[in-house]
Amino acid sequence: MEQDSILRSEWTAIEDELKQTSSPLSSDLEEQYLSVSQKRLIYNNLIELILSGMGVPVLGIYLLLIDDAGVLPWWVKLLLWFTAFLALYPSVRLFRNIHYPNHTLSVRQYLRSLVKRMHYYKVYQVIVAFFSSFVIIELAFLVSAGFKATVDGTLYTGILNFPPEIKWKYVLAVSAINLVFSCFVAAWGYLMYVLFYKRRRAELNAKLSLFAED
């Protein structure tokens, strides 16, 4: 009974903290209701979400520059837009978990769900960063007019326009280079986790260790 009372008390405190973030407060009340770790988590998530969202307009500029001749089919453009919004998914889920928690959970369950969500974010972002880089940069190489080849006196621009006898050599070479580069880009996904969530996850794990198993 005493443990249940402690859990209810802790949950009420966390619920108050989250509710206060959506309403205007004086600085005194903010310090009263928001713990330092909770504020850090909220701010880190918002900053990371904004940075991730910046990838969407960047992709729009990329499409304008790379496809000025209209050579990309609609399904390729749709795939590129999909990869841009794909990176936002874990950030949005974290935002939802932080600001709109499931009130049926105990404090321990709530903290554990955030810890798991941050780990999921780490794995997800590394994979998506690699996938997005490989697809987008690969397309940039394949349709770029900067790649030129003269075969039987005919000048070809763009790898996709090359004759079959040389096209696949270029495709394989570009893909191999892009594969290596995308591995480095995948490190950016992990860096985002380190910058915004690694320390917050450690803080939550420390708080989680204070609670016994249900």
Image (cartoon, rainbow, N blue to C red):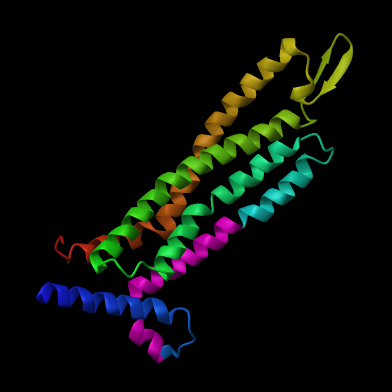
Q: Is residue 113 above or below residue 43?
A: above
- Residue 33, horizontal then vertical, whole percent: 35, 83
Please check the rendered image and state whether residue 42 is part of the magenta-colored stretch, yes or no.
yes
Residue at the location (61% across, 45% down)?
82
- Residue 59, horizontal then vertical, whole percent: 68, 49
Q: What segment is highlighted magenta in the picture?
A: 28-53
Left or right relative to 115: residue 64: right
Residue 15 in which image quadrant: bottom left
Q: Is residue 192 above or below residue 80?
A: below
Residue 156 in which image quadrant: top right
Left or right relative to 96: residue 202: left
| Farthest residue, direction front | 104
Left or right relative to 146: residue 193: left
- Depth check, front residue: 150 or 10: 10
Query: Is the magenta region chiefly helix, strand or loop?
Result: helix
- Residue 144, horizontal then vertical, whole percent: 76, 32
- Depth check, front residue: 108 or 48: 108
Please check the rendered image and state whether residue 39 is part of the magenta-colored stretch, yes or no.
yes
Residue at the location (50% across, 38% down)?
184
| Farthest residue, direction left | 1
Residue at the location (36% across, 51% down)?
119
Q: Is residue 66 above or below residue 112?
A: above
- Residue 56, horizontal then vertical, whole percent: 64, 53
Q: Is residue 20 above or below residue 51?
A: below
Q: How many marks can you see?
A: 0
